[in-house]
Image (cartoon, rainbow, N blue to C red):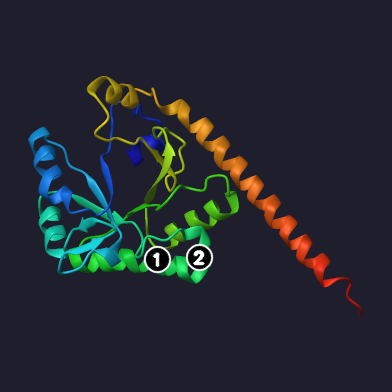
Amino acid sequence: MLAGMETGQDLSKIFVITFDDGYRDFYTDALAVLKQCGFTATIFLATARIQDAPVRVEGADYLTWSEVRELHAEGIQFGSHTVTHPDLRSLGPEQIDYELGYSKEIIEQKLGAAVTSFSYPFAFPEEDRDFTRFLSDALENHGFENGVSTIIGRARPGSNRFQLPRLPANSWDDPPLLRAKLEGGYDWLHWPQRFYKFLYHSVSLMQRSSWIESEEAKRGPTST
């Protein structure tokens, strides 16, 4: 797909199936369905939740490393979903480097294979251009080749390879709805999604500015 994006290839018949976090039900339920259909997938692991023994976090069971290796032998690809699944925008540069670099390193050590894909945890802050530029640079510096986000839509020639959009799929999708999503019927939702993020970001900045001005007014004038 990435090669097609760079050459302007028609991507309307190309799709990639991805799963975030590393939930164990992929191993117990999803794999058999994918194999029956002749599909493969990429799973993005939050590596602190993947251990040698089963881990349960917030009511969900996670894969073990032995299961990850078994899935990898079946042709499933793995990417990074950070170490601790934080909101990266709330962290400093050194913490972000740790979340990106160590998650990649540990998966590569466990599988003996390169990790080139990243999935952003939480809503992707596309409205914060300074942060998204920093994140893209950090991913490239750590050796990632692409990244996926929560931006709704389909990838096209010219899409940022570190901020690729995706389409949500779940048990509520009947065949006509899933077909509509794959054919572009959901792409328009990116615009209200983007507007909401921009509006929320603008209000947050105004509130922060107001708080700073209020604190400065409380301190009163300073003398030199």
> Which residue occupies the extreme bottom position in the image?
224
Label 2 element class: loop
- Is 105 rendered above or below residue 154? below
Q: Which residue is mark 1?
A: 99
- Give the number of the mark in front: 1 or 2: 2
Q: Which residue is mark 2?
A: 91
Observer-nearest residue: 24 or 69?
24
Q: Position of residue 113 (x, y in %)?
A: 21, 61
> Of the residues shown, which amino acid type is indicated by label 1?
Glu
- Is 178 rendered above or below residue 36? above
Could you classify mark 2 by the number of other residues whose Cα lies within 10 Å: few (under 14), some (14-19), or many (20 or more)? Answer: few
Label 1 element class: helix
> Of the residues shown, which amino acid type is indicated by label 2?
Leu
In the image, is 200 to the left or to the right of 115? right
- Is 210 rendered above or below residue 202? below
Could you classify mark 1 by the number of other residues whose Cα lies within 10 Å: few (under 14), some (14-19), or many (20 or more)? Answer: many
Question: Where, quadrant-wise, is the C terminus in this rendering?
Answer: bottom right
C-alpha distance separating marks 1 and 2: 10 Å
Question: Where, quadrant-wise, is the N terminus in this rendering?
Answer: top left
Observer-nearest residue: 148 or 138?
148
Mark 1–mark 2 contact, CB under 8 Å? yes
In the image, is 209 to the left or to the right of 18? right
Residue 107 placement: quadrant: bottom left
Residue 182 placement: quadrant: top left
- The residue under the point 67% across, 52% down is 205
- The residue under the point 36% across, 61% down is 82
